[in-house]
Image (cartoon, grey):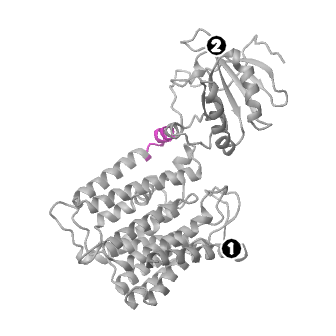
């Protein structure tokens, strides 16, 4: 078996064992992330996921020391010392919430060890301007430190939902391994693969998949800062030297999404007069959650976007696209990103509509919509649906008068109560109803006035969607209770206002 496969498997197994040990020992050692402040989890979770990544790094050092590859001893020592400093500083920050100045100081010292101990430093930025090669000269050391700090903290800032930082870093490590092996740099290729194995071992306990509705362990600052530092090491080492494996602009694309998000978040906080290190809910993944995406859906959407940007940089490298042109594309994409994210009142509804069109189940919808029903078919359809639903599922049928039809039409809302149940029930209803009935079947999304666009009228209490079936009066509601199994109440509503009120003279029949 090739060396790359061996080191990946060894790192993966070592990471799994260490992360599992961290999950067991976390509560005993006080290593728990408590659900306080802006944090959304409901129970204490161990934050020792970085142990798996640190174990993968140490396994690489040991295997490299036994001549798996040939690396100078000073580089290995520098790698071990600087990586350990970052890891234990992050562990202390998780435990005692260190001052950000102390964190930056330790990261700067680790960067200096990387520069003077391993000789990994930024010496040029490539051809960012046509025909001009930007060498750094005396600015090499400060800009290298700045680059390490930027990458380390950018990934830490993106670590806001389960699986996100792990997926982004896994993609970056795998792309770096491809670049390193393509250039014949076996050492950095093995390092990237070992770290990828460490991240994957952590993701097995962090991602919401295989029936798991919450993470068993978090990456913590100890893991996110270590991963960010190792990414910075590889970015710089592979893009510098007399015969680099990639250009500095390629490194920007391989880490574009965390850079975009962190830069925009810091700029927004400074503009609002807040500390750039103060946590809030202004990141892109928070906007996706506001649009109704589940945690796992948001993580996969952003991971796919990150992979796409990384492939742009990879293809640009191998197709020989000019560095200055790729840099202009990177800057243009950053401006587009800023334009979209800084308009959440537009972005959130657009993303919700797009996800609904793609058939993605949203967390905001705990019901199922069935539309285009003739009033005479309501009773028979309800009787058909009842065996397919949970015993306590409620059914509401709404009758309205479309402008283009001569008769009333009915749409049914099935209240499931949980979006997880909607995700399981919706495909079954679609398959059943598509065989005999031409009905529209989709998830029923709860309306959110803070996100939806409204057309303001003179009366602030009179707000109406520009296009909405509920604006086509008259509309009646039939309440079908599960314990009765039949219509128990008819009510006429005035839907021109947000508050539903019973019209005078309406008849109630049980």
Q: Main secondary structure of the magenta part?
A: helix
| Residue 81 badge | none
- Please determine whether, in this image, residue 477 is positioned above or below residue 365: above
Name the residue beneath numbered marker 1: 26
x and y, in percent, of residue 339 in the image = 38, 45
Q: Quadrant of the C terminus?
A: top right
Query: Relative to the observer, which residue lies in front, 363 or 471?
Result: 363
Q: Are there few (<14), some (14-19), or many (20+) residues within 10 Å of tag 1?
A: many
Give the label, 1 or 2, closer to the camera: 2
x and y, in percent, of residue 489 in the image = 79, 20
**Distance of label 1 from label 2 (alpha carbons):** 61 Å
> 140 left or right of 375?
left
What residue do we see at 59% from left, 24% from top?
A: 438
Quick one: which residue is furthest to the front in this view?
1
What residue do we see at 40% from left, 84% from top?
A: 113
Query: Relative to the observer, which residue lies in front, 463 or 466?
Result: 466
Query: Relative to the observer, which residue lies in front, 504 or 483?
Result: 483
What residue do we see at 65% from left, 73% from top?
A: 20
Q: Please say whether residue 133 is one of the residues in the magenta stretch.
A: no
> 25 left or right of 160?
right
Q: Earlier in the sequence, mark 1 or mark 2?
A: 1
Where, by quadrant of the figure, is residue 260 drawn? bottom left
Where, by quadrant of the figure, is residue 108 drawn? bottom left
x and y, in percent, of residue 462 in the image = 58, 22
Identify the element where label 2 is drawn. Answer: loop
- Please determine whether, in this image, residue 446 is positioned above or below residue 407: below
x and y, in percent, of residue 236 in the image = 34, 73
Q: Is residue 508 visible?
A: yes
| Span highlighted in magenta in the image | 341-351
Quick one: which residue is furthest to the top in this view?
406
Name the residue beneath numbered marker 2: 408
> 389 left or right of 339?
right
């Amino acid at each position: 078996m090739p060396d790359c496969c061996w080191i990946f498997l060894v790192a993966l197994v070592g990471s799994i064992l260490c992360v599992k040990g961290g999950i067991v020992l976390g509560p005993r050692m006080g290593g728990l992330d408590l659900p306080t402040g802006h944090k959304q989890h409901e129970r204490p979770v161990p934050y020792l996921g970085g142990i798996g990544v640190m174990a993968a790094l140490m396994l690489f050092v040991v295997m490299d020391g036994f001549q798996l590859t040939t690396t100078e001893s000073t580089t290995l020592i520098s790698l071990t010392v600087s990586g350990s400093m970052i890891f234990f500083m992050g562990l202390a920050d998780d435990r005692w919430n260190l001052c950000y100045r102390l964190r930056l100081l330790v990261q700067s010292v680790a960067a200096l060890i990387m520069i003077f101990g391993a000789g990994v430093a930024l010496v040029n930025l490539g051809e960012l301007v046509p025909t001009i090669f930007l060498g750094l000269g005396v600015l090499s050391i400060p800009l290298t430190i700045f680059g390490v700090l930027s990458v380390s903290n950018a990934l830490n800032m993106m670590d806001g939902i389960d699986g996100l930082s792990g997926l982004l870093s896994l993609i970056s490590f795998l792309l770096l391994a491809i670049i390193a092996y393509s250039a014949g740099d076996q050492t950095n290729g093995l390092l990237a693969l070992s770290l990828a194995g460490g991240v994957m071992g952590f993701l097995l306990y962090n991602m919401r998949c295989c029936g798991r509705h919450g993470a068993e362990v978090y990456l913590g600052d100890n893991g996110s800062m270590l991963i960010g530092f190792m990414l910075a090491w590889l970015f710089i080492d592979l893009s510098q030297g007399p015969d680099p494996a990639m250009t500095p602009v390629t490194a920007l694309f391989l880490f574009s999404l965390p850079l975009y998000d962190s830069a925009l978040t810091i700029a927004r906080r400074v503009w609002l007069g807040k500390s750039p290190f103060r946590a809030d809910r202004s990141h892109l993944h928070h906007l996706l959650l506001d649009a109704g995406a589940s945690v796992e859906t948001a993580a996969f959407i952003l991971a796919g976007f990150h992979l796409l940007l990384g492939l742009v940089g990879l293809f640009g490298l191998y197709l020989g696209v000019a560095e200055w042109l790729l840099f202009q594309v990177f800057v243009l994409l950053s401006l587009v990103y800023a334009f979209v994210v800084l308009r959440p009142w537009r972005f959130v509804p657009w993303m919700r509509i797009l996800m609904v069109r793609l058939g993605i189940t949203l967390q905001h919808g705990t019901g199922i919509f069935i539309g285009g029903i003739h009033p005479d078919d309501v009773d028979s359809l309800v009787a058909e649906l009842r065996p397919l639903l949970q015993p306590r599922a409620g059914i509401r049928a709404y009758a309205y008068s479309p402008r283009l039809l001569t008769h009333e039409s009915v749409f049914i809302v099935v209240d499931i109560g949980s979006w997880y149940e909607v995700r399981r029930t919706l495909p079954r209803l679609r398959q059943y109803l598509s065989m005999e009935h031409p009905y529209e079947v989709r998830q029923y999304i709860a309306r959110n006035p803070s996100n939806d666009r409204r057309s303001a009228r003179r009366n602030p209490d009179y707000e109406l969607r520009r296009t909405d079936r509920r604006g086509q009066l008259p509309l009646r509601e039939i309440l079908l209770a599960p314990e009765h199994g039949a219509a128990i109440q008819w009510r006429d509503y005035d839907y021109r206002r947000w508050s539903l009120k019973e019209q005078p003279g309406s008849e109630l029949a049980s």
